[in-house]
Amino acid sequence: MSAAELEQRLVQTNGQLLELNRQLQQEQEQAKEISESLNHLPQQQSEARKYLRDAEHRLQSRSAAASPLGKAQGRMLQAETAARRARVEELELAQLSANNRQELSRLRIDVLRKRHDSVDGELQAQRNRLSALRQQEAERALERTELLAGQTADLPQSVGSQLQMNRDLSVALNEQAQRMDLIASQQRQAAAQTLQARQALNTLREQAQWIGDSPALGETLRAQISRLPNLPKPQQLDSDMAQLRANRLQYEDLLNKLPQLAQGKQDDGSPLTAEQSKILTAQLRTQRELLNSLLSGYDNQILELTKLKVANGQLVDVMGEIREAAHRYLFWVADVNPLTLAFPMDLAQDLKRLLSRDILTQLSGALIMMITSQETLLPLFGAVLLVGFSISSRRHYHAFLARSAGKVGKVNQDYFFLTLRAVFWSIMAALPLPVLWGALGYGLRQAWPYPMGWPSAMA
């Protein structure tokens, strides 16, 4: 099977997986509606029985009437009583069938989950076959060009550099295949965590009406919630997405430069021989195939990263619903995870990501642009002057507070205006630093060529 056929089948399988995801999510929403309806059933039953008793009492207390209007009113009361009784029976049937409906929903979710896992495994196998096929084609083409190059001694630099470039592209293609496997495993992990969180949410809603009668049940549910996965960090995905797009642009630029490289020359500037031109043409053909494979792989990676980001977003939404339901039903639940032995390592990784070379480079570029732009320099300069004035006048402020403290409590010296002055000058003394931070945030937001400065500005 060719690479084009595999790509077409990959698109079809991907569509099937998306449809199964939609059906699975729809079935999970139905299970959620069943659980929520169970919580409202007792109140609905009590209200329906109350309305039924009122209707029966009005019907029994009504005397027989011979007029057409009285007969019509009697029939209307009978119809209302029948409707109220049917409503009570409907709610009783809903309560009796709740367990069966929940079990059917679980079975349908299990069936859809198994089909989803089967199609996901097939999709992963097709990706592996496509990746292996591209790697084999690239290796065969690279071997052919190296064989041609090995038959000719003293290749010029313009030809030898393309041979090394092809080797580097082949290594990049292998790394890309490994990266695709990692993204696929992260997608499966996100789907499994979302399913775990939804099951915990459904369990919490189902058991909510018995939590008040059993403290042990509440503790069990709290323990189950504490074992849920941590929220994913979107910053790493955004960084990976930006890196992928930068790499794709780089390889696309190399692909556009291939016609210029075809005009190779000797090291002394003379034209290539016929044999050297043949080797160069073969290398450029191989390089074009490698670049096309890399660009196609980067498109797939960007698509899969987008799916991973959507899956992480669904996990975040479900975790938010769990937190809200836990606070509603359990009255207390921890908002943060407990400290474990892995906390120092997680902190070190977060600091490493925060102080990475790319972020520091963009922040330094944003600061330079902020200082050299008149639009951002004037607010920053004014904020710095305000901070300097605040520091220089601090001793006068403390002296004023000391004088004011001596007047407090004295009948002939303590005035309400003194309190207003103290509050006003306290606000003025505390204002410069927030103004400085606001000016820095405004400057970072105006440095649009450096997007990594935006999170610092928002913070």
Image (spheres, rainbow, N blue to C red):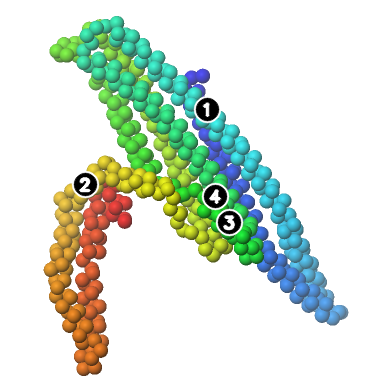
As rendered, which of 139 and 196 lies closer to the eye?
Answer: 196
Mark number, residue 197: 4
Q: CA distance from mark 2 to mark 1?
A: 45 Å
The residue under label 4 is which amino acid type?
A: Ala
- What residue is drawn where x is 77% and y is 73%? 53
Q: Which residue is mark 2?
A: 364
Q: Earlier in the sequence, mark 2 or mark 1?
A: 1
Mark number, residue 221: 3
Q: Position of residue 362 (x, y in %)?
A: 25, 45
Q: Earlier in the sequence, mark 4 or mark 2?
A: 4
- What residue is drawn where x is 35% and y is 35%? 244
Q: Is residue 360 left or right of residue 333?
A: left
Label 2 SS: helix
Label 4 SS: helix
- What residue is drawn where x is 29% and y is 5%? 151
Q: Could you classify mark 3 by the number of other residues whose Cα lies within 10 Å: few (under 14), some (14-19), or many (20 or more)?
A: many
Q: Could you classify mark 1 by the number of other residues whose Cα lies within 10 Å: few (under 14), some (14-19), or many (20 or more)?
A: few
> Mark 2 and mark 4 in contact (Cβ < 8 Å)?
no
Q: Which residue is mark 1?
A: 125
Q: CA distance from mark 4 to mark 3?
A: 12 Å
Q: CA distance from mark 1 to mark 3?
A: 38 Å
Q: Earlier in the sequence, mark 4 or mark 1?
A: 1
